[in-house]
Every structure is written in structure tokens, then in C-alpha cells.
Image (tube, rainbow, N blue to C red):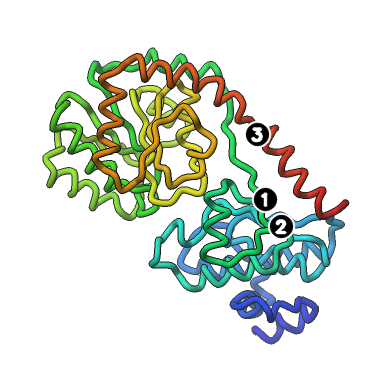
Amino acid sequence: AGAEAADAAPELRLERFPGVAELVRDATIEQRFTFRGAYGPDLFGEVARYALVVGEIARRERIDVIHAHDWMTYPAGLVAKAITGKPLVLHMHACEYDRSGEAVDARIRDLEQAGFDGADRIACVSHYTANTLRRFYRVDKTKLRVVHNAVTHNEATRLLHEEKAIPEPIVLFLGRVTFQKGPDYFIDAAARVIEVEPRVKFVMSGSGDMLPRMVERAARKGLARHMHFTGFLRGRDVERMYAMADIYVMPSVSEPFGISPLEAMALDTPVVVSRQSGVSEVLANALKVDFWDVDGMANKILALLRYPALSQQLVEDGREEIRRLRWDTQGALMKQVYQELVA
């Protein structure tokens, strides 16, 4: 079956990209249009089948530039480039080292490396991410372009702040409960804060593989009455949670960008963010701390709780800062990357 797939696309010439040729050619002809487009037990098979489908599209359509997002689409991007000869732009939102630290999945890392080697340009969501690629993947800096993320603006959502029904201060973590997001540091900082401000409520919203351990960690630290776990939220519930919070904390271990602080600030919620993030590059009106500095994180939370004038100034100055971070502006920067390749 693998030989059939190879015979059907002899022009791919993917041998110089470790793992990609094998991944694509191990998929059978019958599987070309059977991919589900979802996570599952055969994720790498899905990635291969998606690449085959994209290859068929590339043969039939007239294209000028290929744009692929993160590792699951890199094989598809390389296939499309091999078939058409058109330039390939990769958009780097997070790499395996961001997600897993040093415990990387070698298969994913190899596919990422193949993508970076074959790309003509790599759009990074931050300088932090660009530096990560140079450090771990030896990417040529002439390929790298930084295009920061932005935030969707909805002035009406600020009215949600009127819905807060409890008097106690609320400090919020909202995101995947995984290694990358630093939930354990949030809980440790909460324990420090509660020692001096026992009225404060901490909320962890999200799901992930570390959630059961975080519930146990909170219990061990005596936070049962102070820490609330909401599980996964979506849509209007996310906005309502941001608006109810008095402080939003993003303690990420490695965050290529991090849109959540922008979303919180758009709802007039002051934020504390990890310095190990891309969003810290674009925010002046946020308190910043190294993710491992639990005492520093606790002190910044306490400062916002104890000094309302500081909190209010961050909110007011942050409004104009957020207004400048618009998707149409960032989209224009992305268009410039395309124009470099087709001019």
C-alpha cells in the first residue's frame, strides 16, 4: 500500500525531510480522502492523510503562496511545495519545546525541523518564539519574521463587569491545565496570598492532563475553601469569567504569545503575565514576573489587591494599548511576508 502511494506521487522529492516522506508514503491510496480532521488515536495517520488531500488540491488549483500552521500541517505544506514549486510560509504558534519542555516527542520535533528546513519564510508570533526556533532548531534568522497576535474588540462586553455578584476579590487562571501553562505556580502563589489575604478567591478555569494533580495540590496546601475549579469554559462563559475577575494571571512556563491577557484587558481586568511569553513584548500596562518566582507572583497579586489606584491605572492605560493591537494591522504585516515571496 505504501508503494502505491509512492508511485502515485513520484515527484514529491521529500527524502531530505526526515520523517515526512515516510509519513506521507505510508498512507494508502484508499485513505486519501478519509481523514476526519480531528484528534484521535491515529493522529500521525491523520496528518499523513491530510497531506495527501492537500497534495491533490495543490495539483488542481492555481496557488501563489502556501501557508501552513504548526506541525500537523507542515507535511501538507511540504507536499504542496514539492508539487507546485510555490513558496511555503510556516506560521509558528507553538513548538514542541513550548508544549513539553525537554520531554519532547521526537516524531513531532522531527516534523517541525523538516518544516523549518523546507520553509521559505517562518512567521513567528513573537520575538520570544523566533529566539526559540534559533536556539532549538538552528533556523536561519533570515527566514524569520515576527507578526504578533492581536485581540478582537467588543466594547459592549465591558458591561459584563456589572454582573459580578460576590464581594470577595477573584484571581483567575484560564487556560489549558498543562505543563506549558504553569498551573502549579498559580496554585503555589495562591497559597502565599491566602496567608495574608484570606478573603481572596482563586479560580482555575480549564481542563488538561494536570487538572487532577492541581485539585490534589490545592487540597494539600489548604486551599479547599479558596480555590474553585470550573472545568472547561467556552464562548460567553469565558467572557463572563474574565469580567468577574479582579485580576487575571498567566503564569506560563513557555508561551509563544498568549492572547488571554489581551482578552482580559479588553474587559478591563488587570493582568499579571509571565516574562517567558510573547505577549509580554507588546504589553506595557501589565505586571510581569518570571514564571518560577512564586513569591514575586504573589506580591504582584497583592499589590493589585491592596492598591486600587494601581489597578485602575493599568486598566485605563491598557484600554488604548489594546485598541492598537488590531487584527487588520497584523494581517497587513502578514501580507507583507507574502509579498516578499511573490514580488
- In the rendered image, the residue lying farthest to the bottom is 3
Q: Counting residues from the N terminus, which is met first, the one under dot 3 or under dot 1?
A: 1
Which residue was labeled with disc 3? 327
Residue at coordinates 36% horizontally, 39% vertically from top-left?
289
Name the residue beneath numbered marker 1: 145
Give the residue type that dot 2 points to.
Answer: Arg
Helix or strand or loop: what does disc 3 sit on?
helix
Q: Secondary structure at mark 1?
A: strand
Q: Classify mark 3: residues with Cα within 10 Å, few (<14), some (14-19) or many (20+).
A: some
Query: Would you say 161 lies left or right of 125 here?
Result: left
Residue drawn at point x = 77 percent, y = 79 percent: 8
Q: Secondary structure at mark 2?
A: strand
Which residue is more in the foreground, 149 or 240? 149
Which label lies toward us, 3 or 2?
Answer: 2
Q: CA distance from mark 1 to mark 2?
A: 7 Å
Q: Nearer the viewer, residue 235 or 209?
A: 209
Residue 218 placement, left or right of 153: left
**Pointer 2: what residue?**
121
